[in-house]
Amino acid sequence: MHTYSTDNDLRPKVYGVLALLAYGITVLVELVTTALSTVLPFAAGFVVSWGLAFAIIWKIHDRWFWKTRIARALGFTRVPNLNGKWEGWIVTSYEGDIDDQALHPDNDPTEDGQKMKAWLDIDQTWRKINVHFETIQTPSDSNGATMLTEEGKWPSLSYQYENPGSPLVEGLDMHFGTASLEYRDDGNRETLEGLYYTGPGRDNNGLMYFEQVD
């Protein structure tokens, strides 16, 4: 996983809130242990350092709390939770032969581009993300990403990826590329839709569409 950037300024504010919470926990623990020491002598002198309290609170927020409705209601996060498996297709400008097994059932040879079956597996925390893309022919993984939430009606995810290529597909060497996807949630389904393009040496581009399935 790698960090991702956003276009809002919530993160410094959240860090400040978490730091205050950690301080509050250290004070609370000290008060409680002092009160208990009269009946439980072993509790006397027990303290929790600010660093430990902050690390625990940070881990809870980064892994779990940011995804909750409470966190969104409090304004702790605006980025969508994209964790899970996504299933869909791409339409590629690649004009070479593609194995029938890799083609999408809706592929139309009379139209521009070739439609292929594709999947995404996204692993995300409040601060980090990994976007694993896969077709039957080859996989790729993200190495940088940005989420935009301030402009436009829907949030968007843009990421850069590295594809290792495949010795089983002629001309499919290691290459880099970029994908830009718009996230939508209509209450019944969540989708990611957009486009991709590869870097120099391959010069392919196309459309992408995915629905969350897990």
Image (spheres, rainbow, N blue to C red):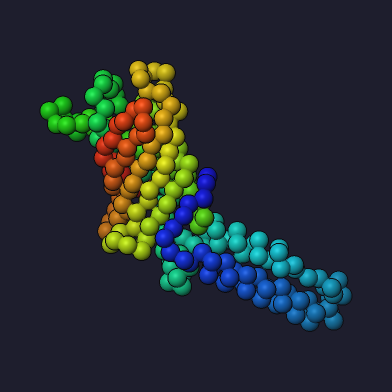
Identity of the residue furthest to the front in this view: 200
Q: How far across and how far down the image is residue 100, in percent?
A: 26, 22
Is residue 132 toward the left or the right of residue 14 in the image?
left
Residue at screen point 14% across, 31% down: 111
Q: How far across and how far down the image is residue 200, in percent?
A: 36, 31
Residue at screen point 54% across, 56% down: 63
**Whether residue 93 is situated above or below residue 84 in the rendered picture:** above
Is residue 191 toward the left or the right of residue 139 in the image?
left
Residue at screen point 33% across, 46% down: 180
Query: Is residue 132 at least partly visible in the picture?
Result: no
Is residue 27 toward the left or the right of residue 60 in the image?
right
Query: Is residue 17 at least partly visible in the picture?
Result: yes
Is residue 112 toward the left or the right of residue 180 in the image?
left
**Whether residue 85 is situated above or below residue 11 in the rendered picture:** above
Residue closer to the observer: 151 or 57: 151
**Whether residue 33 is situated above or below residue 179 in the rendered picture:** below
Identity of the residue furthest to the right in this view: 41
The count of marks equals: 0
Location of residue 32 by image quarter: bottom right
Q: How far across and how far down the image is residue 55, in percent?
A: 66, 61
Residue at screen point 26% across, 21% down: 96
Q: How far across and how far down the image is residue 147, in percent?
A: 40, 55
